[in-house]
Amino acid sequence: MDNIGIVFGCFIPFHKGHESLVKRALDENDRMIIAVCGYQEDRGKDFLPFTVRHKLVKEMFRDNPRVTVALIDDKKIGLDGTFTHENWVAWGKELFSSAGIAPDSAHFNWYTGEPSYVEKLGPIYPDHTFNLVDRTIVQVSGTEIRENPMDLSDDINVVFRNYLLKTGKLEEDPMNPIIDSLLETDLYKFSMGQAIYHNFPDYTTTWTFRCRNKDVKFTPEMVEEIKRQIYLYCDLNFTEDELNYLAGIKWIKKSYVDFLRLWHPRYEDFTITTDAECGLSIETNGTWLNTSMYEIPTLAIVNEVYFRMNYDYEELMESFEQKLDEKIALLTDGTYKIGAFSEFGLRRRLSAEAQELAVLKLKEAKLDGTGSKFVGTSNVLLAKRHNVTPVGTMAHEWIMCVGQGNHKHNPAYSNWYALDYWVKEYGILNGTALTDAITTDCFLRDFQLTFSTLFSGVRHDSGDPIEWGEKMIKHYESLGIDPATKTLLFSDSLDFKRANDINAHFAGRARVAFGIGTYISNDTKVPALNIVMKTTACNGQDVAKVSDVEGKGMCKNPDYVDYLQRCINWRMENEEQSTC
C-alpha cells in the first residue's frame, strides 16, 4: 500500500515554512496531496485571491507527477467558519474528492504545525498518521508577510513572489485592483456571450482600442499600470455566488452558466504597447467568446488609471459628487421628467467608486411622483450588490460578427442574420434590437412583421433621436402594430435635459426608456475620455459599422467600408421590400 502525504493550507502566500513541510512529505512518502483551502472573499482576496493561489500551487508542481493539488472551496461546501465536527467531516470529504483519492486507499501521513488541526482531524481519520511539525524550525509567519511583503519577500516561494512582483503587490502603495469581479461588466456581454457560446463558439475576433480625444496622452507609467490592472483582471474567476446570481436571470441558461464556471480571461490574448498617437495601443485577438468579454473591463481600467494618475483624484470625486447631487435634484424637484432610465456608464466611468456612488444615490433618490423612475444599471456587479435591475440589450458587435463574420453572407443582410439567431436563442425574451449597425433604414428592411412583433422594442444609438423615433413609430404603424406597446430605448450621448425633451415628445405614443452613461458616471470639472474598443475583424476578415452618422466606425480597411456601403446601397435601391 502506498504512503501518501498530505499538506494543506490557505497559502497566503506559500512560504519557506510550507516548502519545508512539502519537502518532508515528499521525502517520507511515495506521493502527496497539497490542498489549497479558502474561498474567493477570504482574507487573501486583496493580496492573493483564492483561485490565484490554487493556480500558482498547480504551477509550482506541474512537472512533479508525485504531487496532486486539491482545491477546497469553503463556500462551495457550505462551511461557515465555525469548524464544528460536522464541518471538518465535510472539509475532509472535499479534500479527498478533489484529489480523486479515497481516504482508505493508502496509508496517509498528515503534516501540520497546528495542534488543533490534529485534535479535530484525528478522530475523523483514526487510521491515518498525524505529524505535528515544530514551527520554530522554520520561523516564518504568513500574517507578517502579508503585513510587510516587501521586507519579507525572500521568505515567499519564488512562483508566488514572481506573481506578486508582476501585480505590483511588492511595491509601496500599489493601486488597488480596479476590476475585482467578473460580474463587473455590462449585462449585454452575458446575453451576447450566451448566444455566441451556443451558436458561434469557433468564431475569432480582433478588437482595437481607440482614444478619440486629440489632446489626451497616456504616459509610459500609465501604460504599465494598465498592463498590471489587466493582468490582475485576468486572474479572476467567477464565484459560485456570482454564478447563482446569473442563473437567476430568466433568460440565462444552465449550459452557459456551466461554461462560465470554467471560463476566465487570458492575458495572452492582449497586446498592449505605447505605439499609438495617444501613447496607448491595445488590441485583443482570440475567440469571440473570450475577446467580447474583455471590452468593458478594459475600458473601465483605462479610464480609472488615467484619471487617478493624471489628476488629483480626490478633487475629481468631490466635483463628481457635487454635480451628481445637483442633477439628481433636478429630477426630485420635477424640473426634468425623463420617465424610466438606467445607468449605462461602466465603460466611461470616472472610477468604480464613482459609479457605485451614482447607482446608490439614484436608487435612494425620492423619485415617486416626479415623472422619473430609476430602473437599474448595466453593471451586473452593482445590480447584484445593490438589488437593482441589471439592464442590457445587444451591441453592434453582434450584428457585425453574425452578419459579416460568415464570408458567404451578403453583409447588407447582417441585421436579418443577427435578429434570426437572437430569436432562436431567446424567443420573445431579452428582445431589444439595435438599429444602426448598418444604418437604420437598412435595418428596417429586415425588421418586418415577424421580428417587429417578437422584439419588445428597439434601441437608438446614433443620429437625431426625434427623427429616429418618428421613423420607428411610422414603421410599427405601417405593420399594424400599436407603437404604444413597444419600447423606444435611447442611449446616445444623453443628459437629463435631452432625455426630458425626448420623453415629452413621445409621451403617450410609445414606451420610452433611457440608458444614460457618461453624464451619470463621469461628469467632473475635467473632460471625460472618449474611448472605445471595437471589433475590427472576425474570422480573419474586416468587419465594419456604418451607423446613422459619420465618425462612429473604426474599420482598419477603408476598401471594406466602401464595399459594405455599396452592398447596402444596392440592396436599398434594387430590392423589393417585404412585409413578412
Image: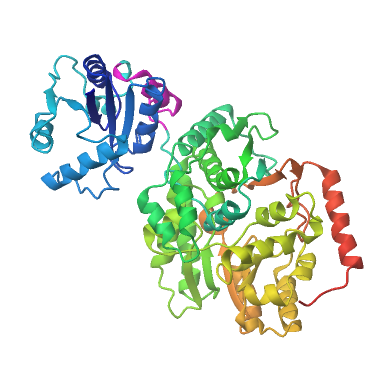
Residue 173 within the magenta-colored segment of the rendering: yes
Left or right: 325 as drawn, with respect to 338: left
Residue 454 within the magenta-colored segment of the rendering: no
- Name, please, the residue furthest toward the right: 574
Q: Is residue 183 visible?
A: no
- Residue 539 location in percent, x, y? 71, 43
- Residue 554 location in percent, x, y? 74, 46
Left or right: 234 as drawn, with respect to 287: left
User: Which residue is pictured at 51% across the width and 38% down the height?
Assistant: 305
Q: Which residues are drawn in magenta?
A: 155-174
In front: 199, or 266?
A: 199
Left or right: 540 as drawn, with respect to 489: right
- Residue 473 location in percent, x, y? 71, 79
In front: 60, or 444?
A: 60
- Residue 397 location in percent, x, y? 66, 53
Image position of 254 with respect to 303: above or below: below
User: Which residue is pictured at 11% across the width and 44% down the height?
Assistant: 85
Image quadrant in which you'd find residue 510: bottom right
Image position of 165 with respect to 102: above or below: above
Instruction: Work out which quarter of the rendered image holds the N terminus and state it.
Output: top left
In front: 74, or 316?
A: 74
Q: Is residue 337 visible?
A: yes
Left or right: 513 as drawn, with respect to 244: right
Q: How is the model colour-coded? A: rainbow
Instruction: Work out which quarter of the rendered image holds the C terminus and state it.
Output: bottom right
